[in-house]
Image (spheres, helix red, strand yellow):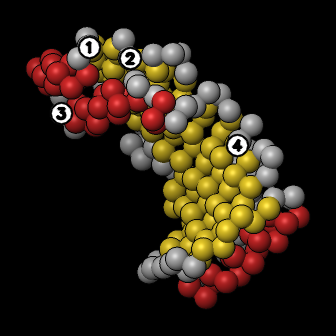
Amino acid sequence: MIRSITDHRGFRRLIVMAVAATLVLTACGKAVETLTEKAIEAQTGGDVNISDDGSSIVFESESGSISIQTDDDDATGSISGTDDSGNEFRVDVGGGEIPDDFPMPVFEPSEVTGVITTETSAGSSYIINLVIDEGDADSVLDFYEDWFASEGFEVIAIIEVGLGSLLAGSNTAAAQVSILDGPPVEVLLSWTPTG
């Protein structure tokens, strides 16, 4: 179960650990690990242990744990963790392939330039980044507005920011389509389960 940030006391500590992980990934050596542990402990007030095996870094404290893993191609990776209540999360970052279980259709022609998948106890959430031709912006909005209607989603808002955005929801999910002016013109598809 994911709780709101205001109800999540350990969230700040996990964020501090994630930021520190980024620093450790760019450096090496036991001295860096020790200094990073001390810096996190000073910010969180707790004991922190860091381990680095070359392809992943694990931070552990009484507030939970965070593991950051890079894949062999260094273009993709994941961040996973557990908070002090045992709630688990996973975020997969990078790549240019739509996950097989992504529930929305992908407008064509487009180029997939980024995929973020977040695994929680509620299910999979996605953010997909596409690049389209500038002249296709209106067609994209029409395409997704029609798809939402056919799938029983209610369009909650049409926002005229950038080249336009649609917010839609159903009993099982919330979705958003946003078109960002370019160049290049980008489409962000967002899907979050609500059940």
Is label 1 in a helix, a strand or a loop?
A: loop
- How far, Cα to Cα, is label 1 from label 2? 8 Å
Q: Earlier in the sequence, mark 1 or mark 4?
A: 1
Disc 1 target residue = 46
Instruction: Tell me which amino acid carries mark 3.
Output: Ala
Disc 4 target residue = 193
Q: Is residue 153 above or below residue 7?
A: below
Residues at marks 1 and 2 touching, judged by CB atoms closer than 8 Å? yes
Which of discs 3 and 1 lies nearer the camera? The answer is 1
Percent of width and height locating residue 145: 77, 71
Q: Is residue 21 above or below residue 49?
A: below
Instruction: Tell me which amino acid carries mark 1.
Output: Gly
Is label 3 in a helix, a strand or a loop?
A: loop
Q: Earlier in the sequence, mark 3 or mark 4?
A: 3
Which quadrant of the structure image shows residue 11? top left
Instruction: Tell me which amino acid carries mark 2.
Output: Ser
Q: Is residue 148 above or below residue 66?
A: below
**90 sits to left or right of 183:** right
Residues at marks 3 and 4 touching, judged by CB atoms closer than 8 Å? no
